[in-house]
Amino acid sequence: MLDASGSMGESGFDKKAPDKRKFDVVKSIVADFIKKRFDDNIGLVVFGTFAFTASPVTYDLKALEQILGMVDVGIAGQNTAIGEGIAQAVRSLGFVHAREKMIILLTDGRHNSGSVSPASAVEQARRNGIKIYTIGIGKQGTFDAALLKRIADETGGKMFAASGAEALESVYEAIDRLEPSPLRSEERINRRLLYPFILLVAMFLFGAKILYDSSLSRRRL
């Protein structure tokens, strides 16, 4: 789960590249994590004011990386619908037959949007045996650490905080150690190729980007 709300467009998260947007830094670190999980089925849910599945759970991780590269800030709106993000991730994992399922929730904000409460979404995850690791990024106080800890504790996961790029890299390394076993199903691996899906996502993101740029232009006027 990747937060694409407006605040993710801020810079200064990476001391080595202070002008680089927080979202771009995060995408680079997430892409490196995906490369390490070469034997897993992984999907991508993006959330802002609403949530959507950018990539279904798949074994085609190269295509997943391409989709990750196309996602941008504001593509799902400016707010932070953590509850809807979790609920969407749970639905995506519902198509996967695996002994272990987990969600990695990354956000730099507080739940302030959507029709699904975090408590309701967490209950859905818990009923389905889905573990949630939560990551709050940025300065303390900008994200709801208490909520992220509660989400992780109630699903058997763990909450992390990262104030910068190096800390976030360490967080993903820690998660990689905590979940060393392949998450793929022993019964079935979803080897569905995502190239047709990439085209659809590209069209969707292109249209959403036009609408987003148009709304910014109207605000300036």
Image (spheres, rainbow, N blue to C red):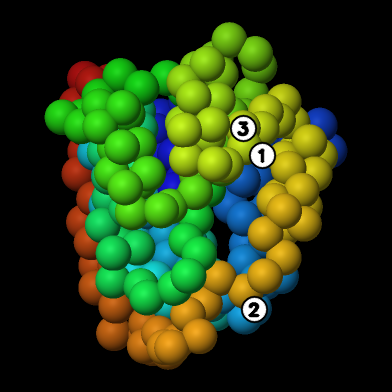
Separation (CA) of disc 3 from disc 2 = 24 Å
Left or right: where 99 falls relative to 118: right
Q: Give neighbour class at mark 2: few <14, some 14-19, many 20+ (Cα, 10 Å).
A: some
Is 113 on the left or on the right of 138, as rendered? Answer: left
Q: Quadrant of residue 195?
A: bottom left
Mark found first going from the N terminus, 3 or 2: 2
Q: Which numbered disc flags the more N-terminal residue, 3 or 1?
A: 1
The residue wearing badge 1 is: 20
- Tell me residue 118's x, y (percent): 32, 29
Disc 3 or disc 2, which is closer to the eye? 3
Q: Nearer the viewer, mark 3 or mark 1?
A: 3
Q: Does 24 sit above or below residue 123?
A: below
Percent x, y of residue 183: 55, 70
Write down the quadrant of residue 213 in the picture: top left
Rounded to the nearest angstrom, the CA distance separating label 3 from label 1 is 25 Å
> Dot 3 corresponds to which residue?
159
Against 186, residue 131 (above or below) is: above
Q: Which amino acid is tagged 3?
A: Met
The answer to whether residue 180 of the structure is visible from this angle is: yes
Label 1: few (<14), some or many (≥20) within 10 Å?
Answer: some
What element does badge 3 sit on?
strand
The amino acid type of the residue labelled 2 equals Phe
Residue found farthest to the top: 141
- The residue pinned by badge 2 equals 38
**Badge 1 amino acid:** Lys
- In screen coordinates, is 51 left or right of 174? left
